[in-house]
Amino acid sequence: MNGDTSPNPESFGSRLGRDRNTGSIRTNKLVKIGLPIFVLMLLSAVTLGWLGVKAASIKAELESATALIPVLKEEIRASDADAAKVTAAKLREHTSAARVAADDPIWMLSIGLPILGPNLGAVSEMARSADDVAGLGISPLVNVYGSLDWDTLMPNGSGTDLRPLTTAAPTVASAAHTVRASSERLQDIDATMLLPQVADPLRQAVQQLNEASGALASAADVATVAPGMLGAESAKSYLLMIQNNAEARASGGIPGALAVLTLDNGRLSLGSQSSATGLGSVSPPISVDAEQQHIYSTRLGKYMQDVNLTPDFPTAAATAQAIWEKKTGQKVDGVLSIDPIVLSYILQSTGPIAITGDELDVAKAAGLPVKLDGNNVVPTLLSDVYKKIEAPELQDAYFAGVAREVFSVLSGAHGEAQGLISGLVRGTEEGRVLIWSSHESEQSVIANYPLGGAISGPSVSPAQFAVYFNDGTGAKMDYYVKRTVQLIKKCPVDGYEQTVVRVTSTNTAPLDAATSLPSYVTGAGMFGVPPGTVQTNIVSYGPAQANVESVTIEGQKTPFAPHRHASRPVGTIAQQLAPGETKTVDFTFGKIVQHNEPRLIVTPTVQAVKDVILTTENAGCPEAE
């Protein structure tokens, strides 16, 4: 029939077949595309889960290792070598497990991924560094420490076997190298793109390794030079200066009692004793470089009492050695310096000393203590001796007797090594223990540390300020002066840092000091200073290349003497304080090119250093427009 529009079964079926075939093709394509994506997503999820497991494991192991560090420190402090070895072994187990987890193949492959990869790489480096420090640093050190008996290694009257210390030196040096290398590896990691969960532990690890690296480097240096300085190869003699803080000098106080200490394979013996006054003057004076002579006068090389008008201990010590050898004919290998405050630290460990011999009669007659301990030794030696013994020669005899008794305790002390070391370390940290060696190989090591007392060189921080005090009264009035020193960071000028060094001093002597204190204490006006008044030459150093811009007293500008010492700016003024009087001096330093955090050094006085140095103050600066 014409016009029939009913469907054609064949054509319909053909189209249906074609549609079904097309759908099958499309489905196959989707399957082929979707299956790899699904597998990839599944693998990614598994990988991320695996990485999460490994990350949790590394974190747990490193935290467990970190928790053992205080335990290990305490065991070492208590000289419990056996317990320290067990703890070190446990610590190594944890760091080794963390390293194994970080070396996992999937973890290592994932380090190449963007964003996540750098974080995984940083964690790996932390795990490896921790294991290197534990295995190549801590474990060998603990084993070496167990072989050292510090009580027998301390110099004493009968000598000691220094071979264990000599044997330990290479191990300590190797451990120091390992820790330094680990620290440098972690410092090379760019933390700017890391997640906080990784960046923060990384910063802490770098800080801790830096501290450990410095300590181990020091230990390695000590292990290297100490045997020789203790006389392991040949006997060494040192001039011992006890600085008297009652009459200020830049490095502490006037050199009072003098003695020669000899060390022969750890055997400590006391030789000649004298006093700075007893040596008299030197003519012609010992040559001192023109720069320091210009600041501190020719007295540096003329009188033993004045060798430390300069704060540069290598200069003072070399001059003291030359004066001693010229006046006595006795050669010495170096100079050691301590003060009565260090003696108080030592006596807190060893217990009191008893005054004996002729000095006992002197003490009884003057009403001085016949036993000195950590509490009374400072006021006795720095004040009461001058109040109660008028004759200078009897004062010197008393000091010599005290030095002899302290030496007797040190040379015979056993079982007190930890306390003695603690006291000496405390004194060193406060600048009260200073060492200089005439042997270049030893001095080159000493010069790297603050106990060398240098005003320039590797031991001096870039932005270091300093305030030194030199007595101008010619007496023992500094016992009564209380001081504070503070850095005040001002607003930069023309891009340069600017800092004020503020020195506040108070004369706490009694108002009637002119008559109530002995003339030997007040000076009796011998050098033009009224009795009871204290005159002090205040010397302030700034960082290298800076300038001393101005000096004010109580806010009013005052003339001052500007100098240069080893490229450092120096400002000097003379100040007088009547009894009860307080004055504040501000030294303003400008053109400071260093942007490091400033550090402050002061002359160690009768006061605790922590009471003298105040916290640095930051002056508020207006925001740049």
Image (cartoon, grey):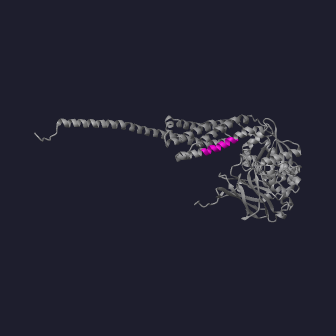
399, 491: nearer the viewer: 491
377, 544: nearer the viewer: 544
Is residue 595 positioned above or below 104 on the image? below
Q: Does the magenta stretch include residue 217?
A: yes
Where's the C terminus, which quadrant?
bottom right
Is residue 16 positioned above or below 488 on the image? above
Residue 452 in view of the camera: yes
462, 48: nearer the viewer: 462
Is residue 183 positioned above or below 500 on the image? above
Location of residue 534 (image quadrant): bottom right
Residue 44 at what x, y percent from top left? 44, 39
Q: In this view, does 537 lie to the left or right of 80?
A: right
Residue 548 at what x, y percent from top left? 72, 57
Residue 601 at what x, y percent from top left? 72, 53
Tell me which segment is drawn in magenta. Answer: 206-218
Where's the N terminus, which quadrant?
top left
Secondary structure mostly seen in the magenta stretch: helix
